[in-house]
Amino acid sequence: MSIWRHLAAGMRRLINPVSKDEEIAEEVRQYFEEAIAARVARGLSPEEAKRAEVLESGNMTAVQERVRAYGWENGLFTLFADLRFAVRGFVNTPAFTTVAIFTLALGIGAATAIFSVVKAVLLDPLPFREPQRLVHLWEGVGDERYHMGDEAYFSSTRPGNFFGWKLGNQSFQDVSAYFWRTMLFSGKESADLVTAHDVYERFFETLGTPVSLRSSGTG
Amino acid sequence: MDDKNTDVIQGTLDMLILKTLSLEPMHAFGIARRVEQISRGVFKVNPGSLLTALQRLDRAGWVNAAWQQTENSRRAKFYALTHTGKRQLEVETADWERRSSAIARLLKAEG
């Protein structure tokens, strides 16, 4: 209940800050008038009464400010004031603003781009069913060209070896193969060189990826 | 005459305002004057604290505020106790009595 009253009172003041401020100012003014009148009634001159009241209660404006400072909406007023100040500063220094915005845009853009790559390469699982069970096998050859440091990498496996692996397989659900090559892809007016793979049977079943278009029995 | 007056004890201002308003609706200066008079000048309420407290009590729903004519035909904001305000006064009074009697016992205790 009370939180709604707090919220509603604050909202009302946010929408119409001037009227609430004037009301507070009026109430404080009225308080001082009454207090001074009470002192005059006790026999002080109006000037003495006024001075005594200010001495005791403080400056009227200070009291008004103190009463105005109550309420959660004051935090927002401060925020709005800061925002106005910031915007005015930007408008007054367009060159600085442009450079600042440009720098921010570049920074954010670069960070986003780098993260997209990191996410795709390092964080996201491969788009296969159970990628943790997928193993890439290849044949190491003596040729230096296929070495990276001590390790042999990526060279074509001889068909005989592949069939040997497939026949002797006891560890994997499926073994399949692909052959990397480039192909010419031609339309009516132009042709493109594209990267293509020949794949052995059960290739897509092994990866566990759905295939939208294929002809059966590719070999 | 009233040189020895002190600020209201921390945390009791709300209770004193609610108690004063339980007698009749009043404007801020009326509350301050009443507290000072009934405490025989011991407690002096600062207008800044008083008006802030009244804002708080209003938002808590313990008092309702409305502008009205005073007895000397000036306009003033009058505060009246609500039902929840009455309940709150009972809660705070009971709490205060528990505390003050405990302090009285402590101060009277002899080794």
Image (cartoon, coloured by chain):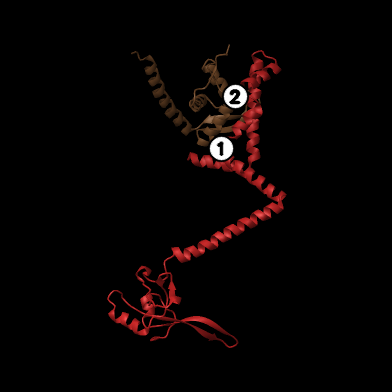
Where's residue B4, x and y in %? 55, 14
- Give the number of the disc on residue B29: 2
Q: Chain of mark 2?
A: B
Of badges 2 and 1, nearer the viewer stands 1
Please state which of residues A126 and A77 is positioned toward the viewer in this rendering. Answer: A126
- In the image, the chain rendered in red is A
Q: Quadrant of the C terminus of chain A?
A: bottom left
Where's residue A180, x and y in %? 45, 81
Q: Is residue B67 depicted above or below A157 in this figure?
A: above
Q: Is residue A209 depicted above or below B17 in this figure?
A: below
Q: Residue at x 59, y 28 (%)?
A: B48
**Visual hue assigned to chain B:** brown
Instruction: Check disc 1 and report its element: helix, strand or loop.
Output: loop
Q: Residue at x 54, y 61 (%)?
A: A112
Q: Is residue A138 depicted above or below B22 in this figure?
A: below
Label 2 environment density (alpha carbons within 10 Å; few <14, some 14–19, many ≥20): many
